[in-house]
Amino acid sequence: MSHPIRGLIVLLTALAGSLWLDGAPLHPAGGPASVGSIETSATAHDLYASFSVRDAFDEDVRERLASGLPVEFTHYVEVARRRALWFDKTVLRKTITTTVTFDTLTRQYSLSKKVNDEVAETSVAVNEADMERWMTRLDQVRLGDPALMEGLEEGSLYIRVKSRLVRRFVLLFIPWDVETGWERVKVSLRSEVTGSAR
């Protein structure tokens, strides 16, 4: 058997067992991470989204954090428009990155938040619950000006959100990004709040 074919078999075998990375289950206790509680609100000049990520902190993430290594979650928020008989069109896109580093000496969590690679906010947390809330709960993320969406048919817009969690490695060297699935909720451009059922 040639080396390329043997390598392909090894890779496929690893991916087939992808729920087990570095010898541990991908999400050992709480099940796979997921995006939920999506809400939108709109004013005359602003469109906002709020959401949370459930079960993001599994055993591997906590071990990495306890060792002093940074943990980074990347959240993708898109406004898209439905198009009949064609692919949906992305109207707006934001990428929010939340990062935490645990100082093993001070026992504090250093937190930062970036929006499209620009630092938007920094903070310090002294307890685990506040840290997890910072990493997984995003409130009132400004997406854009609803005036730019005038003329669109009411009900054609929706917001979709997914999160990429800590990068793992299959067989210790093949990179594997752990992501949630996309979750979505319809957008109303009226000044009111809408929420997903999840």
Image: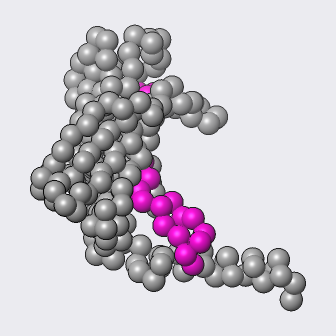
Above or below 84: residue 21: below
Magenta-colored stretch includes residue 170: yes
Name the residue: 60% across, 69% down: 174
Q: Hey, which residue is sitting farthest left in the picture?
A: 127
Residue 43: in sight, yes or no? yes
Farthest bottom residue in view? 1
Q: Which contiguous range is marked in magenta?
A: 155-177
Residue under the point 48% across and 61% down: 167
Front-lying residue, 6 or 186:
6
The stretch drawn in magenta includes residue 40: no
Q: Is residue 115 left or right of residue 2?
A: left
Q: Residue at x 56, y 34 (%)?
A: 88
Up/down of 55 relative to 38, above or below? below
Q: Is residue 173 above or below residue 103?
A: below
Q: Residue furthest right?
A: 2
Res 139 → quadrant:
top left
Say if 100 sits above or below 31 in the image. Answer: above
Residue 48 image position (x, y, % from top left): 30, 27
Q: Quadrant of residue 60?
A: bottom left
* Residue 25 pos. (x, y %): 40, 78
